[in-house]
Image (tube, rainbow, N blue to C red):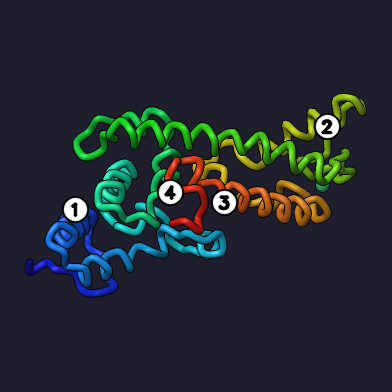
Amino acid sequence: MNRYPVRYKLPGFVVFASLLRMATKYGFSDVREGLVEDIKGAYPTKWVDFESAGVLGEDVFGSPKPHPNAVLNLFVSQNVRFAIPFAYYRASLGGFSALMSDKPGTALPRHTLACAIHGMGVTRQMMPTTVRTISFTLNLTVCPNEACHLNVEVNPHERRIEAVGRLSDIMYSGRQGGVLSAPSLEGVTCASCTPPLKLWHATCRSTCWDILPTAFAVAKSWDEI
Ligand SMILES: [Zn+2]
């Protein structure tokens, strides 16, 4: 126990997991609460906290960074309930291959795997929904600014389809953060397109945040957690 962590200095994941399991098993509630307290910022339960968080998910554990499945397994088995929806989300960002990992400590039990795959499907489906919502809400038309990615030269009938395609590329292509993340629009869209786009995207992202507990079958809402 000479490596017992100083308070507010989170140990590596292996030590953290061992301490959490022991504290839970032997009923050291103050130790458990201390450990859990230190990860609250990285596993937020409120949209505003997610938006302002500097470190998220498994990144909080430092090097070597644990596989998100290992963190999810720990939280589910030790019933760290508040952190479970976001731990599911982080695990789902790696896609099917990461969820199906069978490396030691990363294999998900059948029920956990089923919830993770279901939630991944739900959250991914929110991407085209978000794009459609934004394109219709903003009533996108061709932007006259030639430097803007929403400057699309097509006939009126195809214009909206083209704009939706552009929006989708701008918001989701080549990014790892999933449906909750926001792209940098600097140099991508113009000064008049960017503010409404950002605003509506934030609205859609917070809607996605709200459905995380149901998407991963953890609870009916964040309030229940
Ligand atoms: Zn524009």
The image quarter containing residue 156 is top right
Residue 14 shows which numbered tag?
1
Tell me which numbered mark, 4 or 1, is placed earlier along the sequence. Answer: 1
Q: CA distance from mark 4 to mark 1?
A: 21 Å
**Callout 3 crowding tier (Cα within 10 Å): few <14, some 14–19, many ≥20:** some
Tell me which numbered mark, 2 or 4, is placed earlier along the sequence. Answer: 4
Q: CA distance from mark 2 to mark 1?
A: 51 Å
Tell me which numbered mark, 1 or 3, is placed earlier along the sequence. Answer: 1
Q: Secondary structure at mark 3?
A: helix
Q: CA distance from mark 4 to mark 3?
A: 10 Å
Tell me which numbered mark, 4 or 3, is placed earlier along the sequence. Answer: 4
Mark 2 = which residue? 160
Which-is-in-front pick, marks 1 and 3? 3
Residue at horizontal 50 percent and vertical 55 percent from the top: 222
Which-is-in-front pick, marks 2 and 3? 3
Q: Is residue 27 above or below residue 207?
A: below
Question: Percent x, y for residue 190?
Answer: 79, 51
Mark 4 = which residue? 85
Q: Residues at badges 1 and 3 in contact (C-beta under 8 Å)? A: no
**Callout 1 crowding tier (Cα within 10 Å): few <14, some 14–19, many ≥20:** some
